Amino acid sequence: MKSKQLIISLFAAASLFLAACSADETDLGLELQDPTTSYAGQRFTLTADYAMSVRDDSLSTTGYSLGVVGNYSDTAFGSVSSVLYTQVALPNITGITFDEQTVIDSVVLYFVTGGFFPTKADGYDLHFDVFQLAEAVNSDSNYVATDELPATTTSLYSATQHYTMADSIIALRLNDNILPLLQGTHTEDAFLASMKGLRVSIDPATSTPCMVTVNWLATNTCMRVYYHYESAPDDSLTYELHTGAATHFTHFSHNYAGTTLGSDSVAGTSRLYLDPLGGYNVKVSFASAIENFHNQHPYATVHYAEMLLPLAADSDANRPDRILALRYAADGSVVSVTDMMDTYLYAGYDGGFDTVRNCYRLRLTTQVQGLLREGTDLGLLLTLNSRRHAAQRAIVNGPATADPIRLEIVYTE
């Protein structure tokens, strides 16, 4: 019996081997190779005519899923602070009533965190301040990075707590100043008008330098009212008010004293600054290189093109996750680059960081082919994917360095 089973097993294994040998070619393992090796063609490098760092202070921050609060500084980028503004809204249109029979036990403002920057093993002492706004957050307004709203002198929270990188929720128990804003009967619109909103910040003088990313869309980012009725003191009830699901925006403030930054644009022959939170983007143009290549190779077909963004030696090791590219249109506006909207087979070449080559790599095949057909380049704008909610920044080598920002293409003609 054992001998018969062995023969059957060997026959099955042989069948699988033959099937594997005769199977059609598949894409298995393609993601392990550099995509530029997939094309048999000539290689060419295009160097930039110019590159500069340009201010990003008109950055919209209204209604995004992630925000950030805190303070940070370094010698290259100066200091930055971030403040949260949010409505406090009812969860439905039926209104809310906290009458004289209602006892409010506590009110807690919760933020689900998306991470702390910089990395600090022993954690952070953070002094949060929460104030009621003097002016309501307008649901119809598009607030940008430089916008802010006046706050009242009514402090709803002011205390220091210790947090670690493992903490996923920040809970701020508000003081009794919140009670008059809740008590009574309110309709949806009347409540928004009377509450107006909250200003949330971290005091730089009494806190560890830290930027905290906030997940606005998380269910537990909210304000919860814990209460009971006098007639049933043992019944603990909860009423949840919207903050993350309401209108919110973020204000950023930069101080570039003592750095090379500060003006609307900064020449980038040797260093280019990608500074998040309304700081700096990078504008780069390959116009002369594109025109010269077009004149020499008017019928070239580009099979692969990528932009390489090598990091400067003193760029922070805690890097941004991804760099995006936008292109300038004839009217001066910036629009999406087709390549950056596509779904990529080769994850990591769409603006991600290549640890082997110490650079960011952006696949721009369609974009470069279009430029070569036109024979000109109006420029690209490079931005950080996380520029609205994370403080990670990067310094890229300029076009005059030994390992410069550049376009590498593979083409045939």
Image (spheres, grey):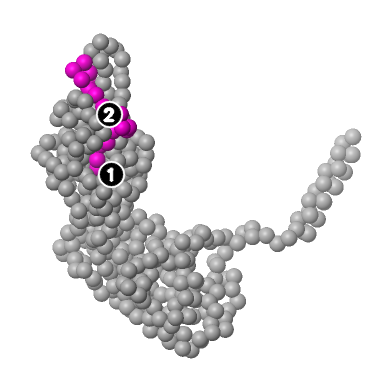
Q: Is residue 409 left or right of residue 315?
A: right
Residue 377 x/y as whole percent: 39, 78
What is the number of the mark on residue 247?
1
Residue type beneath disc 2: Gly
Residue 212 x/y as whole percent: 29, 45
Residue 298 x/y as whole percent: 50, 86
Q: Of callouts 1 and 2, which one flags the residue occurring earlier in the amino acid sequence? A: 2
Is residue 356 visible in the rendered image? The answer is no
Local crowd size for mark 2, using a 10 Å CA cut-off: few (<14), some (14–19), many (≥20): some
Quadrant of the drawing holding the C terminus: bottom right
Question: Which of the pair 322/401 is nearer the observer?
Answer: 322
The image quarter containing residue 320 is bottom left
Residue 113 position (above or below residue 336) = above
Q: Secondary structure at mark 2?
A: loop
Report, in whole angstroms, how far the alpha carbon at label 1 lies from the one at label 2.
18 Å
Q: Which residue is mark 2?
A: 95
Q: Is residue 93 magenta?
A: yes
Q: Is residue 255 left or right of residue 338?
A: left
Q: Which residues are magenta?
A: 85-105
Is residue 192 visible in the rendered image? The answer is yes
Q: Residue at x 46, y 70 (%)?
A: 364
